[in-house]
Image: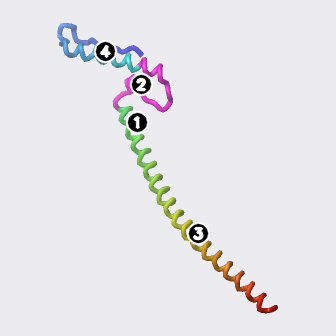
Amino acid sequence: MIAAWDDSDSSESEDEEEQATNLCFMANEDQAQEEATEYKSSDEVYYSDLLEYSKNQLAQALIKYIRCEQDYSSKIKSLKKTISNLSSEKECLERSNNATHTIIETLRKIKSNVKILKK
């Protein structure tokens, strides 16, 4: 994408600072475009790509992103709570399982002692 700006005012009325700003802007965009072709990835957003959208479109995208982020944060919080509950339940079941094994071992010993007494 080639950067350009509208010269609707006469070049005489445009001050040097604005010209320098525009030149820097164009240089930055060229650099961003070079980087974009060098490191193309679907997860990355480049400055030059953002220039193609209006402020309204960018604002709507930001709002959509914030809502998604809030949804994901809510889901993450819910999943963390579920993990915590499952972890507590697992610990409880492990204690119960250990107690059951202890009872079974005790009953086996009692059974073995009963057999010895019957002889």
Q: Secondary structure at mark 3?
A: helix
Image color mode: rainbow
**Marker disc for residue 3:** none
The earlier-in-sequence mark between 3 and 2 is 2
* Element on which disc 2 rests: helix
Looking at the picture, does residue 104 appear above or below residue 27? below
Q: Position of residue 73 (x, y in %)?
A: 43, 50
**Horizontal and vertical percent position of residue 40:** 49, 24
Discs 4/3, front: 3
Label 1 amino acid? Answer: Ala
Q: Earlier in the sequence, mark 4 or mark 2?
A: 4
- Residues marked 3 and 1 touching at CB (< 8 Å): no
Q: Residue at point 50% right, 28% down? A: 41
Going 41% across and 48% down the picture, which residue do you hit? 70
Q: Earlier in the sequence, mark 4 or mark 3?
A: 4
User: Distance from label 1 to label 4 (Cα)?
Assistant: 25 Å
State the separation of the CA atoms marked 4 and 2: 17 Å
The crowding category of the residue bearing disc 1, from other C-alpha atoms within 10 Å (few below 14, some 14 to 19, many at least 20), is few
- Disc nearer the start of the sequence (1/4): 4
Question: Would you name the residue on which mark 1 appears?
Answer: 61
Q: Which residue is mark 2?
A: 49
Can you say whether 1 is above or below 67 in the image?
above
Task: Judge left or right: residue 105 versus residue 88.
Answer: right
Q: Quadrant of the C terminus?
A: bottom right
Pick whichever, 85 or 105, lies toward us. 105
- The span from disc 3 to disc 1 (Cα, nearest Å) is 48 Å
The residue lying at 47 percent from left, 60 percent from top is 81
45 drawn magenta: yes
For residue 8, which quarter of the picture?
top left
Residue 30 in picture, x, y percent from top left: 38, 16
The mark lying in front, picked from 3 and 2, is 3
Name the mark on residue 5.
4
